[in-house]
Amino acid sequence: MQIEQTSAEGLTRAYKITVEAAVLEKKLTEKLVKIASEIRIDGFRPGKVPVSHVRNLHGDALMGEVLEETVNTTSQEAMEKDDVRPAMQPDIEITDYKQGSDLEYSMNVEIMPDIEVGDFSKISLEKEVAKVADSDIDDAIKNLAEQQTRFEKTEEEGYAAKDGDAVVIDFTGKLDGEPFEGGNSEEFQLVLGSNSFIPGFEEQLVGVKAGDEKDLPVTFPGDYNAEHLAGKDVIFEVKVREIQLAAEVEINDDLAVQVGLTDLAELRTKITDQISSEFSQFTRAKLKRSLLDQLADTYEFDVPPGMVTMEFDQIWSDFTKQLESQEKTIEDEDQSEEELREEYQGMANRRVRLGLLLAQVGDTNDITVSAEELNGAIMQEAQRYPGQEQQIFQLYQQNQQAMQQLRAPIYEDKVINFILELASVTEKEVDQDTLMQLPGAEEEEKKPAKKKSSVKKASAKKAVDKKPAAKKAAAKKTDTKAATEKKKAAPKKKAALKKKAD
């Protein structure tokens, strides 16, 4: 085999590799002899089939296998001989080959950069921490009480409904005088002022009384998700069955019992722990972001272009899908496509560079993810899907990509912890608002998040965990991301006049 390096620019290496025809013929002959001893062909005794006969029958196909195997092994040998650490799969192209002649092919490969890891003890970081105030707990419990609001029928004669009250109604929607599908319901409880129905519907029910019958003219929004109703003028015939008033929920032991706890003291403890956990998550996220910023500013080195391209393609794909889900186009953005691409290219470069740096730190210091840690992560993930635990286990065991998605953040956190143990970290007490304002949130508000696991999240929730415990910052897309998803309660019944989901 002859290896000739044809170019070496930055992290890209190009080679011309030649494998002699005699080597190829030897490999082919070995395959033919082996097959001749095993193949069964009419007219020949087992093991007595002539090699020449096998060559005539299968020679071309076997030579194809020989060429593929030869390219795979010789390209690997070439990189090992040149002490090349490939960053990605090499690009290989056969440039010259005819039956009976030498094999010649080109190989272009991007290599890993040499990264010199410095002294992490020289890194100085400020760790923001916040204490849970009694007012935080009081506000959370007050919000919890408001979410437990129940409505009771008013016995007041002639009471006129107002915002905040609930009306129980029967309604039938008509388009051009004919009822339309999904436009009717009976005993539907609607809280006035909730804005859960299309504009103009709830407003016309303010002031109604039990027993009233009223026609409500409304216009469906032009972008309504039912095309046959979008932009159409309709009439809803409404009968008011009863008016319900919100019953005040007292903050006492009964409230705690409603959410599955023993008493108010346990509720306060539970909420305190939840808020503390949220504060810790923000503390960790900000400290990690600060560390990554310092590392990005300190370590400048070339990164494999192909890796950056792959990362950029993923970011851009996420961004365009995000626009599509919001029914927007790039023209709706504040920046031009060229400016956005340049910005995301920089983001991709940063992510790849930090990823390679952390991988180098982990490799140098023998940081690994143990089977116990991985199984613990799978267990934690499986617990999010009550009744489906076994399927989740099987999914990860059988899907290496899903397993890698689970392993990657564990590995990254272990490397980050390793660096933080060496760095100089001082605590700074701040208020809740300061803690929950992630750096760069305004600038990166529109940036796409990294791709998540395709496993769908189950809807099981704990009684207290599903309640907001503290004021939360807007979701932010960075190298580290704390995402808080709000979940809305579903109404009793669905109807066509409900608002289109944003």
Image: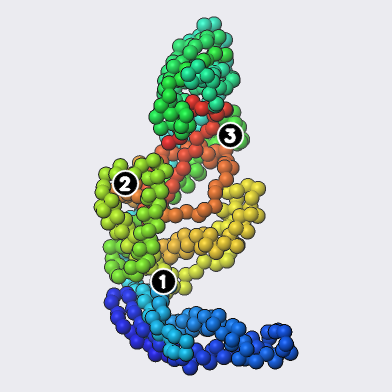
Secondary structure at badge 1 equals loop
Label disc, if present, on residue 321 of the rendered structure: none
Q: In the image as oriented, which residue stretches furthest toward the bottom?
A: 22
Please tell me whether residue 160 is drawn above or below residue 459 in the rendered image: above
Secondary structure at badge 2 equals helix
> Which part of the image, by quadrant, shows the N terminus?
bottom left
Label 2 or label 3, whichever lies nearer to me, is 2
301 vs 17, left or right, is left
Label pair 2/3, CB-CB below 8 angstroms = no
Q: Which of 189 and 25 is in front in this view?
A: 25
What residue do we see at 32% from left, 71% from top?
118
Mark 3 Cα-neighbour bin, 10 Å: few <14, some 14–19, many ≥20 = some
Amino acid at dot 1: Met
Where residue 107 appears, as percent x and y from the top left, is 38, 79
Q: How far apart are marks 2 and 3 (CA)?
A: 45 Å
Secondary structure at badge 3 equals loop
Label 2 or label 1, whichever lies nearer to me, is 2
Question: Which residue is tagged 1?
Answer: 88
Where residue 41 appears, as percent x and y from the top left, is 70, 84
Label pair 2/1, CB-CB below 8 angstroms = no
117 vs 217, left or right, is left
Where residue 47 appears, as percent x and y from the top left, is 70, 90
Question: Which residue is tagged 2?
Answer: 330
Q: Nearer the viewer, residue 25 or 75?
A: 25
Q: How far apart are marks 2 and 1 (CA)?
A: 31 Å
Image quadrant in which you'd find residue 301:
bottom left
Question: Which residue is tagged 3?
Answer: 259
Mark 2 Cα-neighbour bin, 10 Å: few <14, some 14–19, many ≥20 = some
